[in-house]
Amino acid sequence: MAVNKIVLAYSGGLDTSVILKWLQEEYQCPVVAFAADLGQDEDWQAVRDKGMATGAAKVVVADLRDTFVKDFIFPAFRANAIYEGSYLLGTSLARPLIAMEQVKLARAEGADAVSHGATGKGNDQVRFELTYMALEPRLNIIAPWRMWDLNSRTRLINYAREHGIPVPVTKEKPYSSDENLLHISFEGGILEDPWNEPDPAMYKMTKAPEEAPDTPTYVELEFVRGNPVAINGANLEAAALFQELNRLGSENGIGRLDMVENRFVGMKSRGVYETPGGTLLRAAHRDLETITMDREVLRIRDSLIPRYADLVYNGFWFSPEMRLLQKTMDEAQETVSGTVRLKLYKGGCMPVGRRSDQSLYQESFATFEEDEVYNQADAAGFIRLNALRLQIAALKKK
């Protein structure tokens, strides 16, 4: 493949540092290193310096925190997206944003190729490349892990040392991780045996529930048309609001998940996740819907959640079907405005109050006390009509 310039999705870690040098040698062309700040704990100046020292023609670090929250996290949470009943899609939502910005940078730089550090076994290669193809199909795509023979950590380290790339001397982590504002994920290494309990020292974003405060924390989360806008009465911008949710969830030991999931490429994979703010957000949003959404609208919307989550997980964020589903999900959110009060306690997150100007809950109808709006005798005919087919079936058997 003959290319003139490459834009690489770059983190500054061992893998993408080796890829940065390998691309230069393999294709004999300039490589622009692109790093996305999605809220991970990172020394971005060190990333810039390492990229330039490794031969990058340019290192671009983009602050995408607000974009990530407003245009990716919030739309998914308006849809209550959850994969296989547990996973809140932290990595899945980040990849199309990184790839989209890569494409923009490739256009601005006049590059004719993009590259990523995803392996040939995982989901990320699909998410990156489907986005590239959906947004700029003329770009060449280079996936080194599917091409080279540096297929072990030892070979990567040897290559790095041979080419003067700094190799961290810190103790090797017995797993791999990915971090952003929404979550941190852990997989591989000692976690590949699904019977092994994760080391408590592994967790970064959350306190252990056992170490959380002995008294509950109450928090009020306000929504407008499905989007969170304020915490305890204080209006916050998207990224700041999500950071505060992360703090509250973390302090109370909320958001840990250990699951075995089905990768798009066909294999099962064990993942451990920390999603403190996302866990709070989904619980509050889901609860507010119970008083603001019509029953049948809610049921139809809920029937679409697995399909929506599959599209996100499998990398189809920029597909026609995703655009259609997002419009449908957002239409269902027109009435989802109000406030939910959550009780946070030692890993638990329980809605304990909700109110809304759009509420369909009417105490005058639901009360067990005396009322003047509901004739209980009407229920007899309702029951008889619903039982008619059951009666006919029973008579048929006799």
Image (cartoon, rainbow, N blue to C red):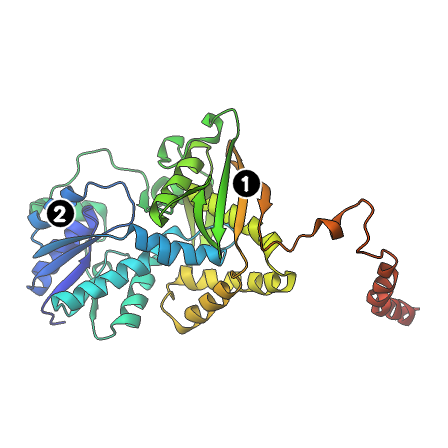
* In the depicted structure, whether residue 171 falls above or below residue 378: above
Q: Give the residue at mark 1.
A: 341
Residue 189 picture location, percent across and down: 34, 42
Asked which secondary structure carries label 2, the reply is helix
Residue 218, numbered circle: none
Badge 1 crowding class, 10 Å Cα cut-off, few under 14, some 14 to 19, many 20 or more, is: many
Identified at 49% across, 47% down, the residue is: 222
**Residue 197 vs residue 14: left or right?**
right
Report how far apart the C-alphas of labels 1 and 2 lie in the structure: 43 Å
- The quarter holding residue 396 reads bottom right
**Do callouts 1 and 2 mark residues in contact (Cβ within 8 Å)?**
no
- The quarter holding residue 5 reads bottom left
Q: Amino acid at mark 2?
A: Arg
Asked which secondary structure carries label 1, the reply is strand
Q: Give the residue at mark 2.
A: 48
**Residue 237 vs residue 260: left or right?**
left
Point out the tag, 1 or 2, that comes first from the N-terminus.
2
- The quarter holding residue 130 reads bottom left
* In the depicted structure, whether residue 60 falls above or below residue 170: below
**Residue 363 vs residue 155: left or right?**
right
Residue 275 in sight in this render: no
**Is 207 or 367 nearer to us in this picture?**
367
**Is 126 or 308 nearer to us in this picture?**
308
Quadrant in which the C terminus appears: bottom right
- Looking at the image, the residue that sits furthest to the right is 398
Residue 29 picture location, percent across and down: 7, 64
Badge 2 crowding class, 10 Å Cα cut-off, few under 14, some 14 to 19, many 20 or more, is: many
Residue 190 in sight in this render: yes
Q: Amino acid at mark 1?
A: Arg
Residue 304 picture location, percent across and down: 53, 64
Identified at 15% across, 55% down, the residue is: 33
